[in-house]
Amino acid sequence: MKIALTTLGSLGDVNPMLGLALELRDRGHEVSLSTSRYFRPHIEKHSIRFHEVLPNLDPNNKEIIHTVLDPKRGPERFHREIIFPDVEKSYRTFLEVAQDADLIISGILSYFAPLCAKKLNKPWAAVMLSPMTFWSIYDPPVIPTMEFIKYAYRVGPDFNRFLFREIFRVSNEWTKQVQELRRQESIDDQSNPLTDGATSEYLNIGLYSPLLGSVQQDFPPNSRLTGFVFFDHNLTHQELSPGLKHFLESGEPPVVFTLGSNSVMKHSSLFDLFYEVAQKLNSRSVILTGASNFRKYKRLSNDKIFFDDYAPYSGLFPYASCVVHQGGIGTTGQAMRSGTPMLILPECNDQHDNLERTKRLGIATGIPMKRVNRYRLRKAIEKLLTVSNYKDKAAQVGNAIQRENGLKDAADEVEKLLHRTQANSQQRIRY
């Protein structure tokens, strides 16, 4: 069968979709992946057919990164100034790609994909990478600048329903380009593209562990939580560097400091703080700086602290005593699978929500990014290293995650949908 996948975002958004594309290809399907041209080499080196859609979200573009990571106006500016101005161009491009497809699979930022599916009358599956994107009134997400929502479950669903209705009413004003495109294309759809319009009547796949939140009664129909798709390649290398591997195998488990693929661009000044705290810890440390910052720090490596530009988390985190990171869902999932306690420094998007959910599991603590200082950072790390409950709980979670098979289960759900739609099509022809 022919499957057209599309997604937009950072490497953390592209990699799970690429992992799914490879699995579906290995099962004999003909697949393509449409995303920003920055990721073309990354996709084509895996022999997956690539198509470009806009905008080109270059993770080295500091202006885009600062917009994305603004916890107050970031979501509005990102959609109004970066995503939605290109939605019609991407719709026209992807419409041609999807013309012959048997199924469309789209990520949360690919707002053009549901419109293409409806225009072509094609089945489509929506992919959700984190619990926040389901917006359940029974398990409300923690929103940046509105952290009080983590107590909202105590108030009850009626309060959450009111709160979400107001948030959705305001955000619907951001989507005028999508609404106009619907009118131009005679697509009968009155949903908010940011919320219910991003979910599919056919299949909604949560590519995260049910340990972070189960399917709720207000989830859209045909929602499945399959577990994480662990695919953490970057554009240059997929293995631990020889120097890092030697360091990891030459002593006690280190504290790992990392800021993912976006925050590393905005918060490069934090690496001085990480280095200062690492020098004072009674533990070894690994600090991942990202390529743009590595030259400044690589000469500071010693027997206690090792700097590297990048390392695949699947290879690094199992060596760690704890992981300090920004709270992205991909990094969070990798730390959960490794059975490693974590200190999360959330700033925006789903990071506060991921912190709250891992705190419920007893495997994490957190400091908001804006409140990080040397004292809080050191004390939080020492707490994770000395309080045995964190380590014990993290090990239990790690064992549970390792029993999940998100990639297989997600591909199984896709194939079930393909078989259902194929059977329905044959039945319509018969009658």
Image (spheres, rainbow, N blue to C red):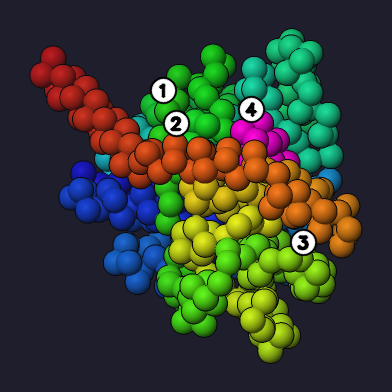
Indicate left or right for 153 with 86 as reference: right
Label 2 and label 4: CA atoms lie apart by: 15 Å
The residue at the point 29 percent across, 51 percent down is 23
Say if 81 sits above or below 183 in the image.
below
The label number, if any, that marks residue 222 in the structure image: 1
Q: How far is mark 4 from mark 1, CA to CA?
A: 16 Å
Q: Which residue position holds label 4?
A: 135
Q: Disc 3 on helix, strand or loop?
A: helix
The kind of secondary structure the magenta stretch mainly shows is helix
Residue 352 in magenta stretch: yes
Q: CA distance from mark 4 to mark 3?
A: 25 Å
Crowding near the residue tagged with mark 1, few <14, some 14–19, many ≥20 C-alpha atoms within 10 Å? some
Q: Quadrant of residue 44?
A: bottom left
Please name the residue that numbered disc 2 is placed on: 225
Q: CA distance from mark 3 to mark 1?
A: 36 Å
Question: Which of labels 2 and 4 is toward the front?
Answer: 2
Q: Residue at x 76, y 66 (%)?
A: 281
Left or right relative to 286: residue 173: right
Q: Earlier in the sequence, mark 2 or mark 3?
A: 3
Label located before the other in sequence (3 or 1): 3
Mark 2 or 3: in front is 2
Q: Write down the region rendered in magenta.
A: 351-363
Q: Position of residue 183 (x, y in %)?
A: 57, 33
> Which quadrant of the figure contains the N terminus?
top left
- Disc marking residue 111: none
Point 87% across, 62% down: residue: 374
Q: Nearer the viewer, residue 89 or 162?
A: 162
Left or right, 170 with respect to 292, comes to: right
Residue type beneath disc 2:
Leu
